[in-house]
Image: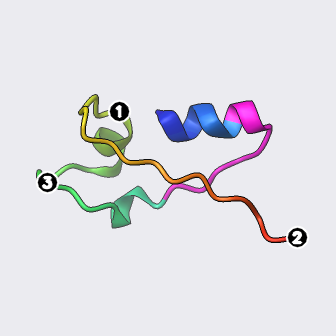
């Protein structure tokens, strides 16, 4: 849920293509979004001006 929290705090939206996210387990996009694993990596990128 870090991506949702970052979008809300930044006052922006987010498009999550979770069907393209790599996963060791065979998880569907909702399971990936709600997964509580400690092995998370999140990239925050700024828009080009």
Picture quarter containing residue 18? bottom left
* Upstream in sequence: badge 3 or badge 1: 3
Specify start and end residues of the magenta stretch as a single range.
Answer: 8-16
The answer to whether residue 23 is left or right of residue 3 is left
Dominant SS type (magenta): loop
Q: Secondary structure at mark 1?
A: helix
User: Is the residue under label 3 in contact with that under label 2 (CB below 8 Å)?
Assistant: no
**Viewer-proximal residue among 42 and 5:** 42
C-alpha separation, residue under disc 3 versus residue under disc 1: 14 Å
Per the image, the residue denoted by label 3 is: 26
11 in magenta: yes
Disc 3, SS = loop
Q: Position of residue 32 (x, y in %)?
A: 31, 44
Residue 43 % position (x, y): 51, 54
Q: From mark 1 to mark 2, how far is it between C-alphas?
A: 32 Å
Residue at 32% over, 42% down: 40
Q: CA distance from mark 2 to mark 3?
A: 38 Å
Q: Tell me which residue sits at (80%, 37%) in the image.
A: 11
Does the segment drawn in magenta span residue 36?
A: no
Q: Which mark is residue 2?
A: none
For disc 1, the neighbor class at 10 Å (few under 14, some 14 to 19, many from 20) is few
- Quarter holding the C terminus is bottom right
Q: Which label sits on residue 34?
A: 1
């Amino acid at each position: 849920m870090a991506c949702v929290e970052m979008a809300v705090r930044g006052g922006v939206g987010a498009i999550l293509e979770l069907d393209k996210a790599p996963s060791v387990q065979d998880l569907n996009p909702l399971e990936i979004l709600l997964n509580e694993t400690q092995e998370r990596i999140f990239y925050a990128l700024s828009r080009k001006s």
